[in-house]
Image: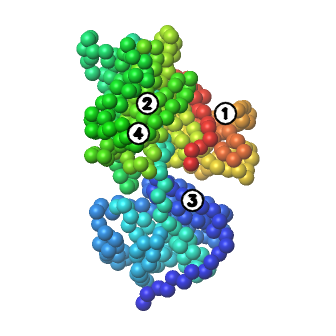
């Protein structure tokens, strides 16, 4: 018997969630609690606590299988589970394309479940509704409406976050920020007779669920003499015409040019696409005295994918010249700079720390303590909360900590300012009794709140290591946090 999925329209599905990275959006009731773990575990969880039901979206690797094969295997696995009964299957639509549905009862927790399955871009999307048996019938129509709000979207995906490290050239006396997951910048040997003073090159890949984009970055510093920058760019055009066999009309049609002033530097831009390889090249020309700084990025990204441009412009704009060696260059080299455009934050973290992203929480582990049961960590949390005060939010954080920690003790609570806003600074002691012998830990949290966003930064270590680690790195990392308007 096949289940009839009749839709009843409710008028309170008024809030929209969009994941550009995962390529979908859906609508939900603004009174529901949403937890986005797509970047961490591939799961979006939405809870309607008032009605005691839950919705979720889970992404799985299809590994080259089509929907029919994948669902057949899934159906076979479900039938083998002893705690699942009353199995029903159907063909449905999800996001405007073919999908399969499964409905069943779980005897282990007395819940009824409906799932819609579909495949797009080698990813399986599973949209689920589950409720206790006594709450199912009252909410199933609302769940079916929720399924119908799900749709796939094609949104150019910006780079949401990247960590930056500093390159410093003592001969030319400039610094440059570049992602620390780039391959190392390489400086090949340059002949003395060659006018080229410096060549830096690096490669990187950007991965998302639909594609892998390869980037090849380079910076060439050339002597301009006896040319000026305009004449130098003309020579560059001559090389393009020879390379692609373009005439003047082809050059005008294929090369997009613009001029911009960035950080007191006049930047000339030239972007073009190679029709043979379908790769695009972004070039930026900057003059410094008698030298031309030529940035290039060869990218395999399509035109509607702007991640490479976001990446590139961030590097170019970071170019900073000095008249004498920067006094803090040693300090700079000890820290990576991290930016998250979606959360609207930037910070510096010590290069011994390793980042684990689980937005809205970022966790930086000290790699030197990673084999310890409780490594030293630096944490940053960003949450949207427009409807509660700082004090209410701080109390909610403490209640959550009390539930997670054993022998929890608040030892310091101070009103302060952080990020230009009123804040609370709290120090906690706690003991993990599950370890033998028990491990004593110490944590400091600073919580600040703007009109609609709460920021929580923390530093956590074993009690015996806390003071030294906080003095060396923790305080600097906390105070390095900067906020800006998120790029959505």
Q: Are marks 4 and 2 in contact (CB under 8 Å)?
A: no
Q: Residues within 10 Å of mark 3 (few under 14, many from 20)?
A: few
**Camera-side mark, 4 or 2:** 4
* SS of the residue under disc 1: loop
| Lateral position of residue 139 relative to residue 233, left or right | right
Classify residue 203 by image quadrant. top left
Rendering quarter of residue 382: top right
Q: Nearer the viewer, residue 359 or 23?
A: 23
Measured along the vertical axis of the image, is residue 138 above or below residue 441? below
344 horizontally vs 254: left or right: right
Residue at 60% in and 61% down:
16
Task: Name the residue rendered at 68%, 39% in the picture.
Answer: 448
Circle 2 SS class: strand
Q: How many marks?
A: 4
Residue matched to label 4: 252
**Disc 3: which residue:** 17
Q: Which residue is mark 1?
A: 419
């Amino acid at each position: 018997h096949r289940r009839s999925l009749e839709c009843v329209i409710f008028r309170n599905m008024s809030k929209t969630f969009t994941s550009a990275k995962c390529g979908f959006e859906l609508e939900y009731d603004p009174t529901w609690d949403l937890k986005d773990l797509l970047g961490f575990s591939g799961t979006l969880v939405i809870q309607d606590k008032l009605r005691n039901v839950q919705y979720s979206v889970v992404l799985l690797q299809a590994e080259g299988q089509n929907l029919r094969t994948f669902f057949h295997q899934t159906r076979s696995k479900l039938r083998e589970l002893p705690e699942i009964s009353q199995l029903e299957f159907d063909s449905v639509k999800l996001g405007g394309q073919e999908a399969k549905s499964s409905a069943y009862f779980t005897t282990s927790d007395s819940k009824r479940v409906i799932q819609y399955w579909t495949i797009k871009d080698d990813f399986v999307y599973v949209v689920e509704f589950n409720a206790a048996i006594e709450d199912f019938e009252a909410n199933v129509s609302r769940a079916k409406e929720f399924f119908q709000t799900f749709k796939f979207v094609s949104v150019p995906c910006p780079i949401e976050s990247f960590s930056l490290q500093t390159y410093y050239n003592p001969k030319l006396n400039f610094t440059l920020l570049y992602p620390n997951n780039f391959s190392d910048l390489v400086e090949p040997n340059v002949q003395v007779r060659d006018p080229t003073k410096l060549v830096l090159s690096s490669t990187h890949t950007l991965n998302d669920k639909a594609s892998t984009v390869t980037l090849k970055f380079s910076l060439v510093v050339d002597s301009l003499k006896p040319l000026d920058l305009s004449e130098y760019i003309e020579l560059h055009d001559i090389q393009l015409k020879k390379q692609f066999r373009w005439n003047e009309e082809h050059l005008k049609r294929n090369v997009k040019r613009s001029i911009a002033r960035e950080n007191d530097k006049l930047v000339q831009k030239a972007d073009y696409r190679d029709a043979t390889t379908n790769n695009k090249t972004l070039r930026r020309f900057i003059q410094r005295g008698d030298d031309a700084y030529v940035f290039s990025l060869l990218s395999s990204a399509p035109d509607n994918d702007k991640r490479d441009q976001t990446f590139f412009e961030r590097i170019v704009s970071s170019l900073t010249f000095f008249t004498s060696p920067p006094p803090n260059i040693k300090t700079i080299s000890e820290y990576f700079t991290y930016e998250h455009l979606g959360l609207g934050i930037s910070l510096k973290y010590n290069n011994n720390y390793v980042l684990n992203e689980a937005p809205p929480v970022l966790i930086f582990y000290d790699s030197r303590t990673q084999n310890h049961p409780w490594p030293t960590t630096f944490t940053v949390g960003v949450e949207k909360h427009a409807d509660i005060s700082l004090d209410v939010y701080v109390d909610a954080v403490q209640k959550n900590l009390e539930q997670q920690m054993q022998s929890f003790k608040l030892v310091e609570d101070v009103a302060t300012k952080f990020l230009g806003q009123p804040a609370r600074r709290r120090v906690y002691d706690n003991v993990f009794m599950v370890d033998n012998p028990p491990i004593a830990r110490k944590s400091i949290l600073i919580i600040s709140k703007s009109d609609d966003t709460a920021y929580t930064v923390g530093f956590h270590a074993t009690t015996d290591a806390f003071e030294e680690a906080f003095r060396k790195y923790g305080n600097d990392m906390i105070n390095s946090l900067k906020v800006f308007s998120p790029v959505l």
